[in-house]
Amino acid sequence: MTHPESGENVFRLSPTTPSEVEDYLLTPRDNPERPAVYASGDVYTFLATSRETDFSFNFFDFFLPVNGGPPPHYHPFEHETWFVTAGEIQYNLGNQGTDSIVVPEGSLIFGPRNRVHGYQNLDSTASISGITPGARTLSLTTPGALDLFFDAISPRVINRDDPIPAFNPTDEDFLNIAEFSIRTGAGISFPSLDYEPPAGTFAYGLVLPEDAEEEVVEQAKALAKIDGFKVWTIGDRAGLPKRPTFTGPFGYEYTSLASFEETGIESSYNQFSLAPQATDTFVRANLIDSQVVEPTHSSAIGVANLELNEAGEIEYSLKVTDLDFGELVEGETAQTPDNELDDVTGLHIHAGERGSNGEHVFSILDPNHQDETDPSITINKDGSATISGTWNQTEKEIPSTLKDFFSNGGLPGQETDFYFQVHTEGNPEGEIRGQIAHTTDDFPDPIKSKVHEAFYVREGTLSFKINDEVRLAGPDTFVYVAPGNEYSVGNFGEIKAESLVVSVFPQTDDEPIVPDDTDYNPVYGSEGDDLLLADRKDKLVGGEGNDTLKIASGGDNLLYGGPGADRFWIADGQLPDTVPETRQTNLPPPFPPLPPLEDTKNTIVDFEQGIDTINIRGIEGISSFDDLKLLPAFGDLQSTSILATVDGIDGEISLANVSGVVFNEFSADDFVFA
């Protein structure tokens, strides 16, 4: 499908969208840098993608204009849980949609896999997206996959201020849905009139807020009498059970909305309120690799403490570990003489908000232009280095906005538009970086996340300390903490904070499928730049060097490039041998017949994006990236099939599979057509 205005192909991941999250993710719901698509006449924003959560869950913001919302369908692969954040939404539960209820903001609905649901905004205009009024609901799906489904079938949002296109599904849309579903077992299915969910399917769950109107409560009581429905309220309402409360992390009181037991030990959904607490703040910058605009994966870290003295000068002290400052200190030698890449070449304070690069406003260490007249560098006994000094007006004027940041105070996690950055021989554009921000020592004792933890701040502000970074989350902000990270949460604002909190168990059985290579003929390269040719049932192994691995004419081959910039030729002047793909069968209505599919059964096993290339030449009908169709490989969400329509083939041909790369992560830069 293409965008209705621009004609561009379906969504590809933005360069600003991380492919994996090792520590945490923080984003407002309408962040224009987050992926978003048009689906069912709505706008769906991906707050957490499958790749970011290691395929454990998706978290979406669904914006529904008036009359927006999907028709009845069910998910054979994932549970879906909605929390209405603005307006009222009618949920239609069951095959015929006769079991419907209009629920208000603050309601939670649990839709188990294989149970039918649809929902619609009848007339609510409580929120706005761009220029369009409507209603909103959050959507949690476990495990992750639904974002990939939307990527495969839906046009991307180019400008959130554009009008939302009308929802008029075509045969092409149903074809895309069918292709994704056949390959993955995920996506959506449309129920027949006599559809019955499989035995043992979980029950629908509905939790109403404390202030739900009596009419809604009465409708909920009627649903509670139907087999397959469970209904609760948060407050005390006659005739409906009340959700339990419990003491959660940091001693905060949680209200359970959906427990692990009720979701099949996949997720729990809770909420809490947190009163403000007093705090003393100070100014600090925590320097890490992930704050660099192009993250460096460096092991180095730094902590800078800053203070505005009575003379209006900024006193600073920065301690850095795992970088070599030795040759910058008089009388010292290199700390790591066998490694020049970690040698520090510069240290500056820059102007720029998080995620953007800015100019130097104060050069502390710079061989070309240094503002600091008397820096002190000390090599500590543990091998770290401490750089300290005073930024005064005679050296270079201190920006008034930076001085005001010190003078006016702020909440922990509130940041300036200034940052420290250390430059090295290995990373001259920046090795580690840290935004200058307010912080505090008044957080509760941290805990280490054992599962995926996600928060959605609904009202007020929450300050998060994740490892050593402190971040501030305002209303309608999503925060995700990956497993294995220490974190703490506090409310240091002026009003009570309301937050949702979701815990998801990691999924461990969805790794990319690596082909069994025991029956393949191995062909090995040397340490140099090799040319390896595959015929049929060959396993090419490039080894060291910049290798060329080429499919001559055969099929059912495995290609391992190894280290180096490798070129994988999957077609050069002729098509490889193919066999019919019998799994591509026709589906019942409303799906149209699917085209026949031929498969080369060739697989690239270790493709490295940004380093390797996939090459195609001399095939009529394939001359650019736009001539390809990328879909998940059969039975493997984390691998990609490269498909095309070519002369002489009835239907489509799968030119190759690429293991371990998701289809929406590819771009034209990964391919060469010559």
Image (tube, grey):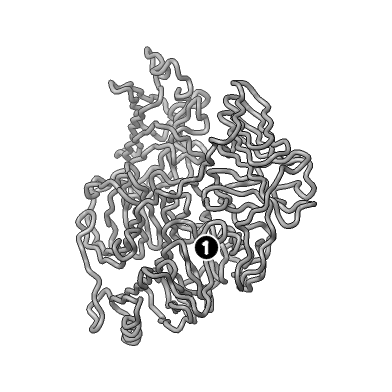
Count residues near mark 1 (Cα–Cα under 10 Å), then give few for <14, some for 14-19, many for 20+.
many
The amino acid beneath tag 1 is Gly
Q: At 31% from the left edge and 39% from the top edge, which residue is drawn?
A: 307
Residue 409 visible from this viewpoint: no
Image quadrant containing the C terminus? top right
Residue 147 visible from this viewpoint: yes
Quick one: SS at disc 1?
Answer: loop
Which quadrant of the figure has residue 86?
A: bottom left
Which quadrant of the figure has residue 260?
A: bottom left
Q: Name the residue under label 1.
A: 187
Tell me residue 442's x, y (percent). Answer: 23, 48
Tell me residue 564's x, y (percent). Answer: 59, 28
Image quadrant containing the N terminus? bottom right
Q: At 48% from the left edge and 23% from the top edge, which residue is drawn?
A: 341
- Between 290 and 401, the one lying in front of the other is 290
- Between 621 and 344, the one lying in front of the other is 621
- Between 508 and 331, the one lying in front of the other is 508
Whether residue 202 sits left or right of residue 363 in the image: it is left
Q: Is residue 396 above or below residue 113?
A: above
Whether residue 648 sits left or right of residue 55 in the image: it is right
Tell me residue 187's x, y (percent). Answer: 52, 62
